[in-house]
Amino acid sequence: MKRVQWLLVIVIAVFVGAGALAQDQGSSLTYSSPLDDLSLDSLFPVRSPSDVSDSMQVAKAWQEGGQRFLDHVNQYDSRIQNAAKLKQSELATVKTRKQQAKKTENSSEKTAALTQIQTDEKTIAMLKDIDGLLDLEKRYAQNLIAAGKALERVNELEREAADRRQAAINKRRAEAGATMKLRNMDPEVTAKQRELVGAYKEYGKRVQEMGGLLVEYSERREKLLAQWKEK
């Protein structure tokens, strides 16, 4: 009986101790609110005006460089297409020569015609590869222009967002000395930041596409150089 009583005393003591510990912990427990302490600059840092100006020069250079490249490609593309048409016409003539040589049983003329046909067909195939490469270069140049315009838009919106944010901060300081926090941004500041994020997304897509085109463009060039060496 005494043993049972002692066990009950121990069990009660454990529960009482645990309850007291829970009360002590509950009274001293505090919760952090990291989002309440974050300022706008922590998520949307502002580039300096000089950095934005430098970026704007890059955007303009991409557009101008892309346009020059596009003009060059268009001019060269016409030459390649004209050369391919001429070579196709010449190939048709050589094939006619081969048929005539076959009828007249002129073996030397037939052999010469066959040799010329093989050369012309290889040349036409290379011209087609060059034309395909030029088409890819054209797409790259167009994308470079588009990426430059997208970056230009990013820079413009970043300037607008910085001005709007600074105006809102100055207004709050004048009224209550409050700082701009993420949880209580002004609606106009929020709207401009969303617009800026959208512009960055479009710019990123253009750069990503341009990178893919550049890789494909390099692979095509490598293939063409190998064919040229074999020729």
Image (cartoon, rainbow, N blue to C red):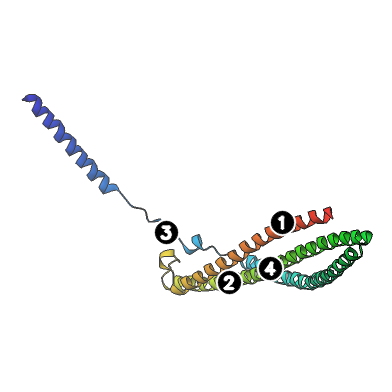
* Residue 150 visible here: yes
> Of residues 68 and 173, which is closer to you in this image?
68
In percent of the image, x 56 and y 65: which residue is there?
Answer: 46
- Crowd around label 2: few <14 · some 14–19 · many ≥20 (10 Å): some
Give the number of the mark in front: 1 or 3: 1
- Crowd around label 3: few <14 · some 14–19 · many ≥20 (10 Å): few
Q: Can you tell which quarter of the image residue 52 is in?
A: bottom right
- Crowd around label 1: few <14 · some 14–19 · many ≥20 (10 Å): few
Give the residue type at disc 3: Asp
Would residue 62 be found to the left or right of residue 103 on screen?
Answer: left
Q: Which residue was labeled with disc 2?
A: 159
Q: Which residue was labeled with disc 4?
A: 139
The residues bearing labels 4 and 2 have C-alpha atoms spaced at a distance of 30 Å
The disc, 1 or 3, on the residue closer to the chain's N-terminal end is: 3
Give the number of the mark in front: 1 or 2: 1
Give the residue type at disc 4: Arg
Q: Is 75 situated above or below 207?
A: below
Across and down, in percent, residue 104 comes to 92, 65
Q: Which residue was labeled with disc 1?
A: 219
Q: Which residue was labeled with disc 3?
A: 37
Position of the N terminus, as image quadrant, is top left
Across and down, in percent, residue 214 comes to 69, 60
Circles 1 and 2, Cβ within 8 Å, touching? The answer is no
Element type where label 2 sits in the image: helix
Across and down, in percent, residue 182 comes to 44, 64
Give the number of the mark in front: 4 or 3: 4
Circles 4 and 3, Cβ within 8 Å, touching? The answer is no
Give the residue type at disc 2: Arg
Would residue 209 be found to the left or right of residue 225 on screen?
Answer: left
